Amino acid sequence: HGRQAPVLLSDDTVHAMRPGSVVVDLAVAQGGNCAVSELDRVVTVGGVRIVGHSNLPAMVPADASALYARNVLNFLGLIVDSKTGAVVVNRGDEIIDATLVCMDGRPAQFMQPTPA
């Protein structure tokens, strides 16, 4: 479970949203990214529906698998040269740098990023 999720949508923000808006809080099990989320409940606040299912991927497994596959494909597109197929680790890319665990046998936190 780890750290508490950061609140990204305050109570005031939710109240400022248009009625009929929907918030799906995927971090509700870690406290939620929305201040008014409730664990394993769908609540309505000021006409805004907040979905707080703790295991939404299990409720929609085909969609969750497709989303995961698309994310992996897009991530690989960042590190594989489309023309040559070679792996190119660009430490100047913030996504690559944030997800890099090790390189050349050394832990990434001890390496300096490559200038962009």
Image (tube, rainbow, N blue to C red):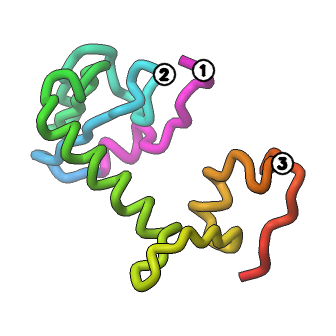
**Amino acid bearing label 2:** Gln
Identify the mark nearer the N-term, 1 or 3: 1
- In front of the other: 80 or 7: 80
Task: Say which residue label 2 marks.
Answer: 30
Kind of residue at disc 3: Arg
The stretch of residues the image draws in magenta is 1-16
Residue at point 34%, 25% (across, down): 37
Q: Is residue 22 left or right of residue 98?
A: left
Of residues 16 and 28, the one drawn nearer to the viewer in this rendering: 28
Crowding near the residue tagged with mark 3, few <14, some 14–19, many ≥20 C-alpha atoms within 10 Å = few
Task: Judge left or right: residue 115 versus residue 83.
Answer: right
Q: CA distance from mark 2 to mark 3?
A: 31 Å
SS at circle 3: strand
Tell me: residue 80, above or below residue 22: below
Mark 2, mark 3: which one is toward the viewer?
Answer: 3
Rendered image: mark on residue 106: 3
**In the image, what residue occupies the spot 26% across and 14% down?**
40
Seen at 70% across and 68% down, the residue is 91
Image position, residue 28 (x, y; %): 39, 24
Q: Quick check: is 11 in the magenta stretch? A: yes
Gap in angstroms between the C-alphas marked 1 and 3: 25 Å
| Element at label 1 | loop
Q: Earlier in the sequence, mark 2 or mark 1?
A: 1
| Residue at mark 1 | 2
Instruction: Categorize mark 1 by other alpha carbons within 10 Å: few (<14), some (14-19), many (20+).
Output: few
